[in-house]
Image (cartoon, coloured by chain):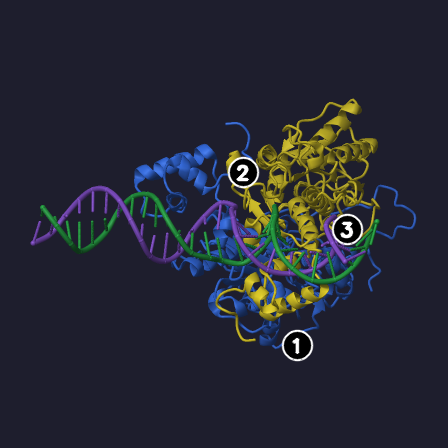
Chain colours: A yellow, B blue, C green, D purple
Amino acid sequence: MSAAEPKSVSIFDVAKRAGVSHQTVSRVINDAPMVADATRAKVKAAISELGYRPNRSARALAGGAVRSVTVLTTDTSLYGTAETLRGIEDAARAAGFTILISVLDPDETYSDSDILARLPHDGAPAIVIAHDETTANAMQALQKTQAHATVATGGEHLGVEQPASDWLVSLDDRTVAARATKYLLDMGHATVHYLAIPSKASRQAGWAAALAEAGIEAPPVVPSGWTVASAYEAAIELVADPDVTAILCGNDDLAFGVLYAAHRAGRSVPADLSVVGFDDSPLAAYHVPPLTTVDLDFRGVGRGAFELLRDKLEGGERPRPIWRSPELIVRETSGPPQRRLLKGLQCIHSSAEASRPRPRPGCSPASPPRPPKPGTPPSCPSTSDN
Amino acid sequence: MSAAEPKSVSIFDVAKRAGVSHQTVSRVINDAPMVADATRAKVKAAISELGYRPNRSARALAGGAVRSVTVLTTDTSLYGTAETLRGIEDAARAAGFTILISVLDPDETYSDSDILARLPHDGAPAIVIAHDETTANAMQALQKTQAHATVATGGEHLGVEQPASDWLVSLDDRTVAARATKYLLDMGHATVHYLAIPSKASRQAGWAAALAEAGIEAPPVVPSGWTVASAYEAAIELVADPDVTAILCGNDDLAFGVLYAAHRAGRSVPADLSVVGFDDSPLAAYHVPPLTTVDLDFRGVGRGAFELLRDKLEGGERPRPIWRSPELIVRETSGPPQRRLLKGLQCIHSSAEASRPRPRPGCSPASPPRPPKPGTPPSCPSTSDN
DNA sequence: GCGAGGAATGTTAGCGCTCACGGCGATCGT
DNA sequence: ACGATCGCCGTGAGCGCTAACATTCCTCGC
């Protein structure tokens, strides 16, 4: 009726109210079968009258079904991680699971017991979203100690010992990386450069494999951090080189950084330079120009990870959720390399027509009408090619 | 030595091993004062030998300090939410708190008890990241029942009853919204249009206030969803209107959508159209052209929310963390409106020089060298102005 | 030298829940 | 009509931990 009672209501309160034993109440709230309908109704009535809500801690302590998953990861703000988390959340929510998240510091080294300490109790189910060394180690730590219930997303390429395959849910980004590289090569690019995110080795491996298959020696990998800013810095030198005509980037953010660097260097995309990303982040299709990238169904994989875990937990072999396979989406940052004939004519109009949004690329038929500030370099690199 | 024991080790195991009572062990693991140094050392040794780790559930059940926060929110993939969460995480991790996250469905209606059921137990500390109706309601539900320990981020504008101010941590985006609007007005724009995210009313209020102060009647608000795609759709009509010269967008993603729409409509930015975003997301500075936006310290606010909560929990009045105030960052998508004299000349070269990265805007002095596909509209809207 | 006082440790009683049983009445087979 | 069976429900114990109190031992003041 009025406000909340001082002591929170327990199953005993409910039991007394309903005129049954506490155990019957327990059965009702756990949907156990052996309860008469009439009793069940009485108990349910008492529950709602009293505003009873089960205490998770007590439930966990008493050894009941856990109904919680701990997600271990390093950076929740990366697109891939965030989406995977989202997928796990969606599935967990639907199944009535609570999700705990434990964020690890990528720069720190954890002992196995540090990792275990992140779980609410020993043997608690966990999912690790693994895409760097820290999370890969976490995965192994859990694998070692837990009898079951560890799932990793995207860890197959991490250079650590392969866990039992039925613990692993991952996207085959290696194959698409190769496909994307081949796509660029087939278009006539002499080679493809790779701007690497920190340790997502499978993409790099796919790239290298495609190059090897084409009998091309792989140019040195250009390392970058996870941010647009770091990609921009890392790409400055690369885009300045007119012989570089195609760059495969570890993810979309890096691609945006490269695109920006290319823009500043006065190279037009895709005429002078093709850029391909990874992830198909929401912005990719709406970038100017729209980014050629790879659709990676992180959310689906997150859901898949949760379902796998639940299978392990509850035994039931439920239908596996399927997720989309990675797929190259060609938009407007990629195309055949500019023929050498046209060299010297740098600002080339891009006319590639690709998927979905079909923009009219901007153009500038006239010279700037507004007075350029003194000291401003001519906005078009025009003739001065290096 | 070898693998993990079947039963997990409890304080009793540790106590036996160390030759003390279980309570002494409890005291040690809780850093209680009344323990002799020698005993403490013995217990600690036993703990590490046995690999003991406290069970959180048991601890919570027994009424110990909780050391966990539940974060309630709707969409973890939005930039603002993700960053706020990140800030909470950072602070929580440093304080040794576990964070639980509970994701609400924005389209669903929750009763108070639905919300309470998300907590591990009655009275558990919680933070809600509020920026829509669902989360605002959640905030109220918690406020009603909990004696304390509810913090909301950014809820002051939600049109719901104002909670006690010492529960609220928020960014003053209303004031910056007004400032940004005024900035555009001062530059000579006849008016400023607003592309709204779903219910972040304070930004809209700031915009409206600035317009009112300038004696300008506010044009109708253009509603949009949270995604770039929805912003693009919503802006198509707006950008087609040559009288629209300035658009303030609810966040950066929307701004990107508008920019893309403007590009497709053949309007050049900032000469024809100024676009201002909100959030200063990582990409903003590296967009082509770099986006004028508002720096919003979500991470700082997240940390602040956690610290506030901890104050309430532990009583100690620790130094409040401060976060940056919102600040307008002028980059290159905003500038004075194009003078009417130049009308008819649509593709104008943008030459605004602004903060930080100073790119050379791309230009296209020549006509397309590559054969345009048949059916492709002329890539430059040229003379055909509508 | 003896009781007061305090530091260090032990003992007891739950927290709210679930598990493993055990009891009781109604139904079934023969 | 009888025990065997089954559905339904209750009892007791204990999960791992902490709060509150009880106990022991040591130190100090007069």
Q: Are marks 2 and 1 in contact (CB under 8 Å)?
A: no
Q: Which mark is residue B217?
A: 1
Q: Quadrant of the C terminus of chain A?
A: top right
Nearest to viewer (mark 1 / mark 3): 1
How many numbered tags mark residues here?
3
As helix, strand or loop, the secondary structure at mark 2 comes to loop
**Position above or below: B286 against A35:** above
Q: Is residue B184 left or right of residue B345?
A: left
Q: Which residue is mark 2?
A: B7
Q: Quadrant of the N terminus of chain A?
A: bottom right
Query: Does residue B66 appear in the picture of this structure?
Result: yes
**Position above or below: B92 against B13:** below
Q: Which residue is mark 3?
A: A363
Q: Amino acid at mark 2?
A: Lys
Nearest to viewer (mark 2 / mark 1): 2
Q: Position of residue B328 (x, y in %)?
A: 56, 59
Label 3: chain letter: A
Q: Position of residue B233 (x, y in %)?
A: 77, 60
Q: Amino acid at mark 3?
A: Cys
Q: Which sits in the foreground, A141 or A178?
A: A141
Q: Are marks 1 and 3 in contact (CB under 8 Å)?
A: no
| Residue at x-position 74% and y-position 30% | A206
> Counting residues from the N terminus, which is met first, the one under dot 2 or under dot 1?
2
Label 2: chain letter: B
Q: Position of residue B246 (x, y in %)?
A: 67, 64
